[in-house]
């Protein structure tokens, strides 16, 4: 199989932990289409994205009066949703395989921002640090905590820190990996933000 289309075992486990394990083949198909049919790839990605509550590639941006794209979120929610915008920017390139690590990192930043909002913890703390901070006093569901720990240990830490095991001109994550991780992070983020009363800048409730 084209190495841009394969999904690593730890990413398959993340899909399972977030309940979207049946999306693995769809992620590989989107990765395949990104290499030659961007329109079809985008259509299929947006279809999956729309099925997840909140802001994603399908609705995070709007066209301003002067023509440029701008976020629909409130300014104070920028740390939560800015990563979603960066994912879209990195996917819309001629060589998305060179941006897979960035796509993974920005997807995880989204989860980190959601976790901080959910727990009320601020500052320069990673997902793992926050989980350790709230250990024993969290109201998060056990399965969500398990998914967060797996995301942090198996994916996020590697995306941020590991470079020595990557072959020359190779990539840590395939395109299919980063599509799958993005969607899993959207699912995790939606679970964290649900019930917090977050709205768009137009006052529309994101999680009714």
Image (cartoon, rainbow, N blue to C red):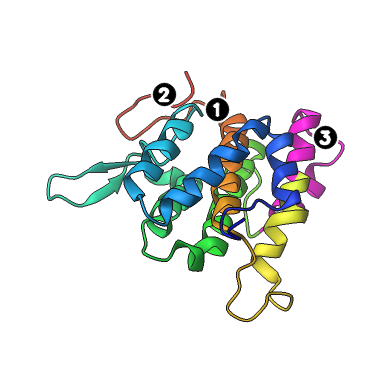
Gap in Å between the C-alphas at discs 2 and 3? Answer: 28 Å
Q: Secondary structure at mark 2?
A: loop
Q: Position of residue 164 (x, y in %)?
A: 72, 79
Specify which label sits upstream in the sequence, 2 or 3.
Answer: 3
The image shows a total of numbered marks equal to 3
Residue 44: image tag? none
Circles 3, 1 touching at the beta carbon (< 8 Å) = no
Q: Label 2 belongs to which residue? A: 205
Q: Is 135 or 61 nearer to us in this picture?
A: 61
x, y percentage for residue 65?
13, 44
- Which residue is under mark 3? 137
Q: Nearer the viewer, residue 17 or 84?
A: 17
Query: Which secondary structure type mostly characterizes the magenta part of the structure?
Result: helix
The residue located at (45%, 43%) in the rendering is 77
Residue 196 is labelled as: 1
Question: Residue visible at 69% across and 70% down?
Answer: 161
Q: Is residue 167 left or right of residue 96?
A: right
- Residue 167: x percent and y percent? 67, 77
| 140 relative to 84, above or below | above
Q: Is residue 168 visible?
A: yes
Give the residue displayed 43% in from the left and 45% down from the top.
76
Q: Mark 2 near mark 1, Cβ–Cβ under 8 Å?
A: no
Q: Which residues are magenta?
A: 125-148
Instruction: Judge whether residue 201 is colored magenta.
Output: no
Dot 1 crowding, Cα within 10 Å, few <14, some 14–19, many 20+: few
- Label 3 vs label 1: CA separation? 19 Å
- Farthest residue, direction right: 136
At mark 3, the secondary structure is loop
Is 153 on the left-hand or right-hand side of 64? right
Q: Earlier in the sequence, mark 3 or mark 1?
A: 3
């Amino acid at each position: 199989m084209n190495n841009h289309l394969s999904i690593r075992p730890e990413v398959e486990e993340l899909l399972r932990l977030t309940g979207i394990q049946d999306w693995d083949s769809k992620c590989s198909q989107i990765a395949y289409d990104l290499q030659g049919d961007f329109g079809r790839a985008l259509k299929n990605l947006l279809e999956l994205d729309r099925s997840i509550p909140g802001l994603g590639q399908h609705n995070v941006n709007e066209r301003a009066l002067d023509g440029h794209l701008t976020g629909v979120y409130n300014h104070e929610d920028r740390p939560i949703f800015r990563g979603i915008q960066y994912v879209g920017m990195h996917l819309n390139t001629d060589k998305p395989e060179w941006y897979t690590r960035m796509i993974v990192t920005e997807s995880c930043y989204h989860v980190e921002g959601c976790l901080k909002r959910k727990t009320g913890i601020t500052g320069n703390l990673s997902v793992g640090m926050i989980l350790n901070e709230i250990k024993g006093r969290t109201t998060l569901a056990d399965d969500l905590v398990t998914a967060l720990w797996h995301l942090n240990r198996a994916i996020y830490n590697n995306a941020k820190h590991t470079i020595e095991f990557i072959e020359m001109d190779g990539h840590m994550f395939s395109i299919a990996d980063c599509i799958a991780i993005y969607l899993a992070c959207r699912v995790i983020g939606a679970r964290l933000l649900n019930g917090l009363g977050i709205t768009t800048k137009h006052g529309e409730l994101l999680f009714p």
